[in-house]
């Protein structure tokens, strides 16, 4: 079964079936929004980390896009493992959510925007629209890496403005983002 994936962390993946008995025009945004809300409910039980990568696929997506986002998530996971613990579950978290256009739905915005503050989980969501034509691996990696770093900066500013985080949690998110961006850039084929 082929599926679109919506996830906010590596262990919280929700599959949305592709067209199994459902007309293409009936799936649209409601199917994707259902996947997003389900994934957020599942993620609420995840252990704390300073930074998480989320992705919303709007339908069929080029394999290179899906593959590079997975590689970025793996880089983030390795960077988190390398962090000395100093923050706990009471600290705020940054979730960078990449919105990838597909044949069913595409982001209705360009660039980056602030998403919701999820109080139960103490996380600030930053949404990044991936351009539709971006398929060259080097350009895609540079887009993902630079937007990851910029999204963490935007989240830190927003959380500071609303007094939602400590300097430690946003500094850890920035360190993880910089390390992950550096790793994925250095390993691009």
Image (spheres, rainbow, N blue to C red):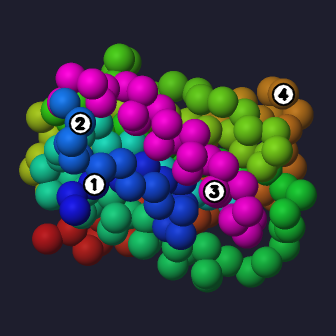
Give the crowd class for mark 3: few <14, some 14-19, many >=20 residues within 10 Å. some
Spatial CA distance of label 3 from label 4 is 26 Å
Mark 2 or 3 closer to N-term? 2
Q: CA distance from mark 4 to mark 2?
A: 43 Å
> Between tags 3 and 4, which lies in front?
3
The label shown at residue 3 is 1
Q: Earlier in the sequence, mark 3 or mark 4?
A: 3
Q: Is residue 117 visible?
A: yes
Crowd rating for badge 4 (residues with CA inside 10 Å; few <14, some 14–19, many 20+): few
Q: Toward the viewer: 141 or 129?
A: 129
Q: Quadrant of residue 185?
A: bottom left
Q: Secondary structure at mark 3?
A: helix
Instruction: From the top left corner, tell me how far across and down residue 20 is, in percent.
Output: 22, 47
Q: Secondary structure at mark 4?
A: loop
Query: Sequence order check: which comes first, mark 1 or mark 3?
Result: 1
Q: Position of residue 132 (x, y in %)?
A: 18, 32
Identity of the residue drawn at 81% across and 27% down: 161
Q: CA distance from mark 1 to mark 3?
A: 18 Å
Residue highlighted by disc 2: 22
C-alpha separation, residue under disc 4 versus residue under disc 1: 37 Å
Q: Secondary structure at mark 2?
A: loop
| Distance Cα–Cα, label 2 vs label 3 | 25 Å
Q: Magenta region, mostly helix, strand or loop?
A: helix
Using the image, determine if residue 29 lies above or below residue 74: above
Which badge, 4 or 2, comes first in the chain's sequence?
A: 2
The residue indicated by pointer 4 is 162
Which residue is tagged 3? 42
Q: Which residues are magenta?
A: 24-49
Asked if 28 appears above or below 141 in the picture, the reply is above
- N-terminal of the pair, mark 4 or mark 1, is 1
Which residue is painted at 37% across and 25% down in the image? Answer: 29
């Amino acid at each position: 079964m082929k599926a679109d994936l919506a996830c906010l962390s590596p262990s919280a993946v929700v599959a949305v079936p592709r067209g199994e008995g459902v007309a293409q025009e009936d799936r649209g945004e409601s199917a994707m929004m259902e996947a997003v809300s389900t994934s957020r409910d599942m993620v609420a039980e995840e252990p704390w980390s300073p930074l998480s990568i989320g992705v919303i696929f709007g339908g069929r997506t080029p394999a290179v896009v899906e593959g590079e986002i997975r590689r970025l998530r793996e880089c983030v996971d390795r960077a988190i493992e390398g962090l000395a613990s100093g923050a706990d579950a009471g600290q705020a978290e940054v979730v960078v959510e990449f919105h990838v256009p597909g044949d069913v739905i595409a982001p209705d915005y360009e660039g980056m925007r602030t998403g919701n503050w999820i109080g139960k989980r103490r996380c600030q969501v930053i949404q990044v629209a991936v351009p539709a034509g971006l398929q060259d691996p080097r350009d895609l990696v540079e887009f993902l890496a630079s937007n990851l770093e910029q999204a963490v900066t935007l989240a830190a500013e927003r959380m500071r403005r609303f007094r939602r985080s400590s300097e430690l949690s946003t500094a850890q998110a920035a360190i993880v983002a910089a390390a992950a961006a550096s790793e994925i850039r250095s390993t691009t084929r």
